[in-house]
Image (spheres, rainbow, N blue to C red):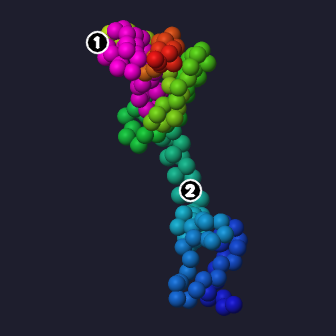
């Protein structure tokens, strides 16, 4: 076994011997993780920052955090990155959202971001129903109600039939002739 034709996986510490013709492996055959320097982080290996530069950077980042905290605007809505900053408004919003969710009977998940959605109201919908040839009647009638939900994270909206309408639909479909 030659030392040049082998390497050690940094994830599972297994020795990997590779063929000279094929070259080194890209993935560990034991744990399937990537090999090499991809996604590796080396802290302070090449250059060292003197204490003065380090404390200056910390002071600047602390000042920016306090400025964001004191600025009582919803900066996370203006940010295009999709991430919310931890400021007073977002913490207060999270607390309020949790209280609302605790009082809800149903908590559907947002189809976009998988957060729980908030119930915002019931909408009465009037339609011209289609008569189903299978059950010989309309499935919902000419008027029904839907509960609307909004996601507090990505603001996606969706609706569901109110429970009584769901039950009526299930009964109509179950008694198909």
Q: Which residues are magenta?
A: 129-158
Q: Is residue 93 visible?
A: no
**In front: 174, or 54?**
174
Is disc 1 placed on a helix, strand or loop? loop
Residue farthest along the bottom direction in this orientation: 2
Residue 156 highlighted magenta (yes or no): yes
Q: Position of 133 compared to 154: left or right?
A: left
Residue 76 highlighted magenta (yes or no): no
**In front: 118, or 88?**
118
Instruction: Measuring from the top left, give residue 84's x and y in whole percent.
Output: 48, 36
**In front: 52, or 164?**
164
Say which label, 1 or 2, has the lower sequence index: 2
Instruction: Measuring from the top left, give residue 116's x and y in whole percent.
Output: 54, 28
Residue under pointer 1 = 128
What residue sits 37% from the left and 34% below the top? 78
What residue sits 46% from the left and 17% below the top? 177
Q: Position of 105 compared to 73: left or right?
A: right
């Amino acid at each position: 076994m030659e030392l040049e034709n082998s390497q050690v996986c940094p994830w599972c510490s297994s020795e990997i011997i590779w063929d000279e013709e094929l070259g080194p492996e890209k993935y560990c055959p034991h744990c399937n993780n990537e090999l090499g320097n991809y996604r590796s982080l080396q802290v302070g290996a090449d250059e060292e920052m003197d204490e003065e530069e380090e404390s200056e950077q910390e002071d600047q980042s602390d000042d920016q955090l306090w400025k964001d905290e004191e600025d009582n605007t919803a900066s996370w809505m203006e940010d295009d990155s999709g991430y919310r900053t931890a400021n007073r408004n977002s913490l207060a919003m999270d607390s309020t959202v949790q209280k609302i969710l605790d009082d809800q009977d149903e908590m559907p998940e947002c189809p976009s971001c998988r957060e729980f959605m908030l119930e915002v109201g019931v909408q009465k919908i009037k339609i011209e129903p289609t008569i189903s040839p299978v059950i010989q009647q309309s499935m919902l009638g000419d008027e029904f109600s839907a509960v609307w939900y909004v996601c507090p994270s990505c603001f996606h909206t969706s609706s569901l039939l109110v429970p009584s309408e769901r039950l009526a639909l299930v009964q109509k479909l179950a008694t198909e002739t």
